């Protein structure tokens, strides 16, 4: 059996997007409230009983969040274009070095029902 432990967070940000569908509104700067969840997978440590201390996960998220919150995502190096897929990949790259066992990053926009999930490749 494998355990998964998760932490959710949100950020508000703006972006533009060049696309063929809904092109006019996407090209203009517009904003969303993004929700994100990071999930770590593994076995609980026999001494602590935890896969990872959620306090450490919250610290990592709180170091990442200011890079995204209330920013124009188009300006963030390594994120362009600011799609849900690229947001997942960016969050993964930023958090993975400090969070061994990172297994899933999910980003969604509740107001319009869009989401993207990035999972670690099966071993």
Image (tube, rainbow, N blue to C red):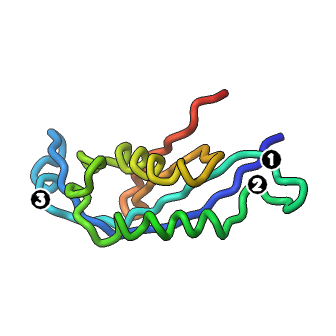
> Which mark identifies residue 2?
none
Mark in front: 2 vs 3: 2
Mark in front: 1 vs 3: 1
**Residue, far right:** 46
**C-alpha distance separating marks 2 and 3:** 43 Å
Chain-order first, disc 2 or disc 3: 3
Q: Is residue 113 left or right of residue 123?
A: left
Q: Position of residue 102 (x, y in %)?
A: 60, 47
Mark 2 residue element: loop
Q: Are the two marked residues, 1 and 2, in contact with CB atoms closer than 8 angstroms?
A: yes
Q: Write down the quadrant of residue 25 in the picture.
A: bottom left
Q: Is residue 95 above or below residue 32?
A: above
Residue with the mark numbered 1? 43
Q: Residues within 10 Å of mark 1 (few under 14, many from 20)?
A: some
Residue with the mark numbered 2? 51
Q: Position of residue 115 (x, y in %)?
A: 43, 50
Chain-order first, disc 1 or disc 3: 3
How many numbered discs sit on the rendered protein?
3
Seen at 35% across and 64% down, the residue is: 68
In terms of depth relative to the viewer, which is nearer, 55 or 27?
Answer: 55
Q: Position of residue 94 (x, y in %)?
A: 45, 52
In terms of depth relative to the viewer, which is nearer, 7 or 96?
Answer: 96
Residue with the mark numbered 3? 28
Seen at 51% across and 53% down, the residue is: 95
Q: Is residue 62 above or below residue 92?
A: below
Mark 3 residue element: loop
**Residue, far top:** 123
Chain-order first, disc 1 or disc 2: 1
**C-alpha distance separating marks 1 and 3:** 46 Å
The N terminus lies in quadrant: top right
Seen at 63% across and 65% down, the residue is: 56
């Amino acid at each position: 059996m494998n355990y998964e432990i998760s932490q959710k967070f949100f950020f508000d940000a703006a972006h533009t997007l060049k696309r063929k569908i809904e092109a006019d509104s996407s090209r203009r700067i517009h904003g969303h409230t993004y929700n994100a969840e990071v999930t770590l997978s593994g076995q609980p440590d026999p001494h602590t009983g935890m896969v990872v201390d959620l306090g450490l996960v919250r610290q990592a998220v709180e170091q990442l969040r200011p890079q995204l919150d209330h920013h124009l995502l188009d300006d963030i190096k390594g994120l362009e274009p600011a799609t849900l897929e690229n947001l997942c990949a960016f969050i993964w790259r930023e958090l993975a070095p400090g969070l061994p066992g990172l297994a899933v990053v999910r980003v969604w926009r509740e107001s319009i029902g869009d989401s993207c999930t990035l999972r670690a490749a099966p071993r």
